[in-house]
Amino acid sequence: MVTESNHRSTLDESGHLRSDLWLDQPDAHARIDTRVEAGVVSADNATLLHKFVDHGYLAMHIDLDETATGAFDDQIGHLWRERPADQPISLPGRSGPQSFAIYEGPERPIGYRLPDVHGFSPNAMALYLHAGIFRMVELIFDQPAIAFQSLYFEYGSAQALHRDPWYVITKPVPHLVAAWIALEDITPDSGPLIYMPGSHRLPWFQFEEDSVELTPKATAAQREEYRHWNQEMLRERLGRVYPERFTCRRGDVFIWHGGLQHGGAEITNPDKTRKSFVVHYSTAATYRQRTASMAVRDGDGSRPVKRTTAAIVDAPGARGLDAPMKQH
Ligand SMILES: O=C(O)CCC(=O)C(=O)O
C-alpha cells in the first residue's frame, strides 16, 4: 500500500532508490528512442545514454591538449609553493580537509587531493565549466545542471568501491552525476579509476533506515556487515565481484550515475602519477548553495570552520558554485 510516508521515502520496500530522472524510469530506452526520432537527441548521444541507463556510466572525449594540462600542472605547482590558507587539501586516513596553510606533511604525498581547486586554477575552472561535458550532463538530467564541487587527484585514490551519495548529499538524492576527466594518459599501474558496471541499479545498504548515507555514526560492525552484503549482492545480481578499470587517454571523460559503485585501483607503481579532475553536478533548480568545512590554524592547534556559498560562476552553456573556502 502506498501511504504518504512511504511515498516520500528515499528508498522503496526493496531498498532501491526512488528516482524522478527520466533515465531511471523502466521505459528509459524507449524514451531515448523517441527523442532520437523527434530529432532532439543525436544517434551518437543516444548510444551514450543507452549505455548510461544499462551500465551506470558513459565515456566521452574532450579536446584537452598538453598546453592546457601543462598550465594546470603549473597552477598546482604554484599552490604547493604558496600553500594558501583558503585552499583545502585532503589526505588519506584523515577525516576531513585541512587548510593548505597548516599542512606540514611531505610534498605531494600519494593519495593527496585538492578539493575545489577550481577556485584557484583557471584551467580547473575551464574543466569545471566545460560546455561539452555540461551538454551531456544536462541530457542525463533533462534540465539545467549545476557543478557544485570538484576534486583534483595527482595520484590514484586507491579508494575502496563506494557510491557517491554515501558522502555527497543532493536533494533529491538521484540528482547527482559525476564526471572524471583524465589530465594525462592513465596506465594500469597508476591506480586507475575502477567501477562495477550495472551497480547503479542495485539496492542500497541502509546504515540508517531509509538513508543512502554512510554517516560517521556507522559502526565497524555495520561496515563489516555491509562488505559481506555487498559481495553477495554483486555476485548474485551482477555475476561478478571484480571491477573494471578505466585506463584511458588524456581528455577521456567518464561520467557516472550517482548510484554507480566506483573507486581507485591499487597503485602498483608509486612513481606513476594519475592526474585527474572530478566534478560533481546536480540539477540547478534544486542545488542552490553548498557548505564545506576544513580545519584551519588556531594558535598552536586547529579548529574546524564551515563556509557556505551560493555564488555562481558561469561560462557559455555552463554554471557552477564557486569554491566555498575561497576568500576573494
Ligand atoms: O578517482 C578516483 O580514484 C576515485 C574518485 C572518486 O571516487 C570520487 O571522486 O567520487
Image (cartoon, rainbow, N blue to C red):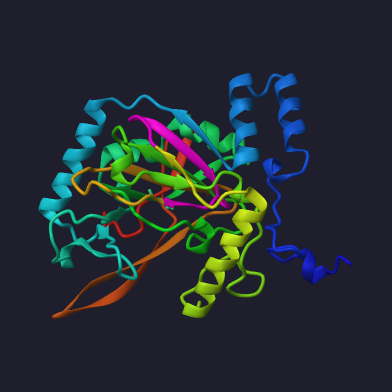
Instruction: Say which quarter of the image contains residue 87.
Output: bottom left
Residue 255 belongs to magenta span? yes
Q: Is 292 left or right of 107, judged from the image as shown?
A: right
* Percent coordinates x, y for residue 181 in the rendering: 38, 38
> Front-most of 29 and 21?
29
- Asked if residue 143 can be seen in this view, the reply is no
Please identify the quadrant where the C terminus is shown: bottom left
Q: Is 154 left or right of 300, judged from the image as shown?
A: right
Q: Residue visible at 62% across and 70% down?
A: 206
Q: Is 143 left or right of 67, judged from the image as shown?
A: right
Q: Residue visible at 35% across and 43% down?
A: 277
Q: Residue visible at 58% across and 30% down?
A: 48
- Asked if residue 291 can be seen in this view, the reply is yes
Q: Residue visible at 27% across and 56% down?
A: 111
Please identify the quadrant where the N terminus is shown: bottom right
* Percent coordinates x, y for residue 15 in the rendering: 70, 63
